[in-house]
Image (tube, rainbow, N blue to C red):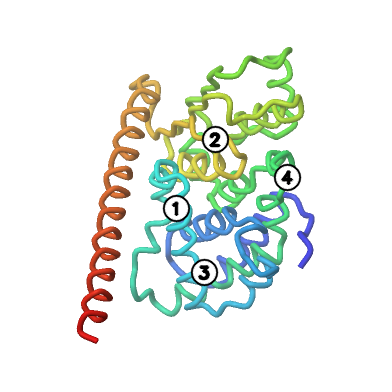
Amino acid sequence: MPLARTTPYKLAEKIAAAWHASNISEAIAVPLGVTATLALLGQQDLHEGRDVAQHVLGLDAAALYGFLRRLWAHAWLYDPYLVSCCRPLAAWLDAEEPADELLRAIHAVARSAVTGGLLGLTGHPDPVERCHYDALGALLTVLRSPGDRHALAEHHSPPDLTALLVQLALLETPAAGRSFDDCAAGTGGMIRAAALMLRLSGADPADYRWSMGDLDPLAAACCAVNAMIWGLGSHVLIFCGDTLASGNGPALAARRRREVLDRFEHLAYAVAGLQAVIEAGQIITRAARRDAA
């Protein structure tokens, strides 16, 4: 299935329409989370030449729910820290037996996202293409009520404006290792523009350091997903909080990142040790059977 061409806001309107048509009272974290999960997919994530979009569209509601859970598990193995920052977008997947109404709503949102062209924005094999868009920012804006946007002072900067600001700030390509920080990032629009400019100049965003924060947990979680979509690399910090009340968000995020990676390393060693014990037991069992024969 060819990657459909659309714009983030056209896509967001289609996804929001599917969600609202489901007449379900769940929070907007569900449609936003479904979209964020599918946004982690790339054409390379399925083997044997199968098309990603066709695979997703071929799943029934229950199978899709399991598929979304496995996507997060796979992403956790790739980047446990960023996935831990995505928790507000995936908490609804904890239910072992979700209600049928929720499953149908999730299924409708996923189909709208895929047929509407999500993978053309977020799953393109070329990272330069992926850096052109913030599909999650558009969807969060559309899903929010005007009152919520006003209360949260949530007004995302237009892509043309962020591109202009970055061009004025980066007259030359900065040396690798420089840090880019945005303490009121929304879903990361300014960071996206900076990453795109770096790529267009021949640099790799993974060679730089990034930190993004926002007062809204959903927006901060979207920053984490976008960091993976845009290929910002392993030097990324995500924090959620009021930077006017406390300006140490990046420091707290750095400490939390160390804690998450330490736990992941400990778990990896434990799993490796268990696997070694299992393999040793299998060897002993085979030897015992040979002796008995």
- Which numbered circle lies on residue 126? 4
- Which numbered circle lies on residue 135? none
The residue beneath circle 2 is 233
Query: The disc labelled 3 sits on which kind of residue?
Result: Ile
Query: The disc labelled 1 sits on which kind of residue?
Result: Leu
**Badge 3 or badge 2: first in the primary sequence:** 3
Q: Quadrant of the C terminus?
A: bottom left
**Badge 2 or badge 1: first in the primary sequence:** 1
Query: The disc labelled 2 sits on which kind of residue?
Result: Gly
Residue occupying the point 69% across, 41% down: 127
The nearer-to-camera label among 2 and 1 is 2
Query: The disc labelled 4 sits on which kind of residue?
Result: Asp
Quadrant of residue 260 within the rendered picture:
top left
The nearer-to-camera label among 3 and 4 is 4
Residue 14 in picture, x, y percent from top left? 67, 62
C-alpha gap between disc 1 and disc 3: 13 Å
Is residue 225 shown above or below 235? below
Dot 2 falls on a residue whose secondary structure is loop
Dot 1 falls on a residue whose secondary structure is helix
- Name the side, left or right, on which 31 lies relative to 14: left
C-alpha gap between disc 3 and disc 2: 30 Å
The residue beneath circle 1 is 89
**Badge 4 or badge 1: first in the primary sequence:** 1
Dot 4 falls on a residue whose secondary structure is loop
Residue 130 in picture, x, y percent from top left? 69, 44
Is residue 69 shown above or below 248? below
Quadrant of residue 259 within the rendered picture:
top left
Judging depth in this view, the residue of 70 and 265 nearest the camera is: 265
- Name the side, left or right, on which 67 lies relative to 161: left
